[in-house]
Image: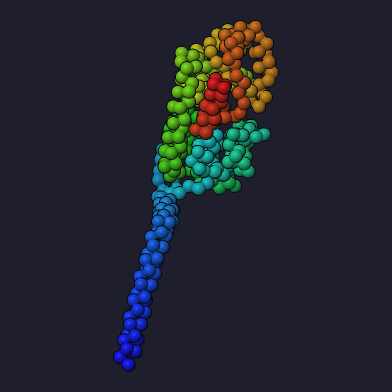
Amino acid sequence: MKGFNTKIISYVVMVGLLSILLTACGSNNTANQQATDTPAKTSEASATEESAVKETEAAAREAFVVTDQVGNTVNISGTVQKVYAPGLEDYLVTLGVTPVAQWSTGERPQQYLQDTLSGVEEISFANGIPSPESVVDLEPELIIFPTAFYAQNGVYENYSQIAPTYVFKNALGNVVEATETIAKLLGLEDKATEAIAAYNTKLEETKAQLSSVSAGKKAIYINANARAIFLVGNFHYGGYVLSELGFAQSTLVEGEMSADISLEMLSDLDADYIFINDNDGLGDAFLADIKASPLWNALPAVQAGKVFEVDGDHWRSSGLIAYQKTMDDIVAFLQP
């Protein structure tokens, strides 16, 4: 009987020990699984919390007052979602903002932005500044004009009745400064900082790529349209990019935004590289006359084969996107 009892006790002890071991193993497996799951769950939680914080900050952004570049007092609501900024679409897209409407020639908007803005309503500037009635139904919360020219002759007074209206003296010159200003109006300073850093990096890399062909050389950007052929200075558009890349400019346009060019002026066109942009074919007749001139064919750049027909409306547009596309074109032409 004693032997039987001893066997039972031994069996009970073994079962107890086995239960303890199984429990311990289960606990370890649970702990290991928790250790494996924790980083992912913590990461997801952090991302959710960060998103919530940003949304809260945006919602809590208080209204503020600024003075625009021509002296107008502008009351900005805390969070601006709907923006109308004709001619500044590049700047908005850079900041991740889709405008309520986009500038158009009357036939087409800026083509180089259509991968982002396709389908956005177009407002024609073919006949000048459109009437406020064309904008009012869009219900913008902020209107931004790129130059003081847009706000003349009562235009500002009419538009500012639709929504707070900010006017630049000329946003098309210093694109970095203009991007920063628009970002402050919209509370998107972080995005501006990131975009500007990327632009500056590309600029320095492109300058280095072209240093052997830009040193001591002059380059000119010519824009041809239905009205005339313009030499574009280094204040905006492709002329600005050429200057930023280290090319000197022709004396014909030095210190000027642009200058008309006539047949008589051709012999004074001092440039080692000439970039011509025919504005959607509108400058065909003028360019034909220019290229038929003996004065044109006598130019060193023409004789050296350093005249480049450039395509795309980014050459005659302003903004970080347009300027980087123009850089790419210049590199392709000069370092194929």
Q: Quadrant of the N terminus?
A: bottom left
Left or right of residue 332: residue 290: right
* Snapshot quadrant of residue 286: top right
Residue 38 location in percent, x, y? Answer: 39, 59
Q: Quadrant of the C terminus?
A: top right
Residue visible at 54% across and 37% down in the picture: 89
Residue visible at 41% across and 55% down in the picture: 43
Residue 283 location in percent, x, y? Answer: 66, 21
Residue 165 is at least partly visible in this image: no
Q: How is the image coloured?
A: rainbow
State whether residue 219 is above or below residue 110.
Answer: above
State whether residue 22 is above or below residue 217.
Answer: below
Residue visible at 32% across and 88% down in the picture: 3
Left or right of residue 51: residue 102: right
Residue situated in front as seen by the camera: 109 or 69: 109
Residue 95 location in percent, x, y? Answer: 48, 41
State whether residue 332 is above or below residue 88.
Answer: above
Residue 122 location in percent, x, y? Answer: 62, 40
State whether residue 209 is above or below residue 5.
Answer: above
Residue 270 is at least partly visible in this image: yes
Left or right of residue 194: residue 116: right
Residue visible at 50% across and 38% down in the picture: 94
Residue situated in front as seen by the camera: 96 or 245: 245
